[in-house]
Image (cartoon, rainbow, N blue to C red):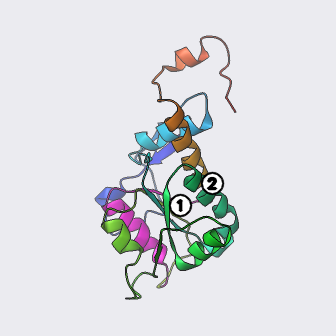
């Protein structure tokens, strides 16, 4: 599993959402016999270490709410508390998964918003899928807050599912550092499913 390394911490006002104009300062690779451990290793190598416990904050674009529900289900099954924006929380709770904290849109001045929640240290992982760019793009504020506060952040449902798989695998067994030669010593490496 490869992960691009981007120096977002040097540019605090920049949105961490990847775009075609961006250039990485390098790549890291996580390799293991399971997808989950390989993903977890790639994230750790890129400085986006996945948490073992705590709260996952979800803010999903409408197009991602259906598939994002599975990510929420997996995080809850791993023992994480969930926090979400109102629309995302409604969908998650409708499916029978409890949401501990529902937050207002950024800047609504109706209680705490996502940025406040992240800045308070109450969130360990953010799953935020972009809705687009523009004045109502709360996602950019959420992702900047995650960066500024050292909170792991993923921006696609696929990455959210991969993060859940990585967290589950790390909980079952500690990642082991091996050389490529060790993986290939007995022939082609086989991926555990």
Residue at figure coordinates x 49%, y 79% from the top left: 137
SS class of the residue under badge 2? helix
Q: Which residue is mark 1?
A: 155
Q: Position of residue 128 (x, y in %)?
A: 52, 65
Residue 178 in view (yes/no): yes
Crowd class of label 1 (few under 14; some 14 to 19; many from 20; radius 10 Å): some
* Residue 35 placement, left or right of 109: right
Q: Quadrant of residue 111?
A: bottom left
Q: Which residue is mark 2?
A: 158
Residue 1 in view (yes/no): no
Does 14 appear in magenta? no
* Residue 120 placement, left or right of 90: left
Residue at figure coordinates x 57%, y 73% from the top left: 89
Quadrant of the drawing holding the C terminus: top right
Q: Quadrant of residue 71?
A: bottom right
Q: Are marks 2 and 1 in contact (CB under 8 Å)?
A: no
Task: Please tell me which residue lies in front, 159 or 103.
Answer: 103
- In the rendered image, the vertical position of residue 157 relative to residue 174, given as above or below: below
Q: Position of residue 168 (x, y in %)?
A: 55, 41
* Residue 184 placement, left or right of 18: right
Does 147 appear in magenta? yes
Segment colored magenta? 136-157
């Amino acid at each position: 599993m490869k992960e691009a390394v981007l120096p977002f911490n040097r540019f605090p006002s920049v949105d961490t959402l990847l775009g075609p104009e961006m250039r990485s300062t390098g790549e890291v690779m996580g390799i293991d016999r399971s997808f989950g451990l390989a993903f977890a290793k790639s994230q750790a190598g890129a400085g986006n270490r996945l948490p073992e416990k705590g709260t996952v904050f979800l803010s999903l674009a409408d197009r991602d709410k259906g598939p994002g529900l599975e990510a929420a289900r997996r995080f809850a099954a791993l023992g994480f508390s969930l926090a979400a924006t109102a629309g995302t929380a409604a969908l998650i709770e409708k499916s029978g998964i409890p949401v501990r904290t529902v937050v207002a849109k950024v800047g609504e001045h109706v209680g705490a918003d996502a940025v406040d929640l992240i800045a308070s240290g109450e969130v360990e992982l953010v799953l935020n899928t972009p809705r687009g760019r523009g004045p109502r793009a709360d996602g950019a504020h959420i992702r900047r807050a995650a960066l500024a506060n050292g909170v792991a952040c993923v921006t696609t449902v696929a990455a959210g599912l991969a993060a859940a798989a990585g967290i589950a695998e790390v909980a079952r067994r500690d990642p082991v550092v091996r050389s490529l030669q060790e993986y290939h010593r007995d022939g082609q490496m086989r991926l555990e499913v």
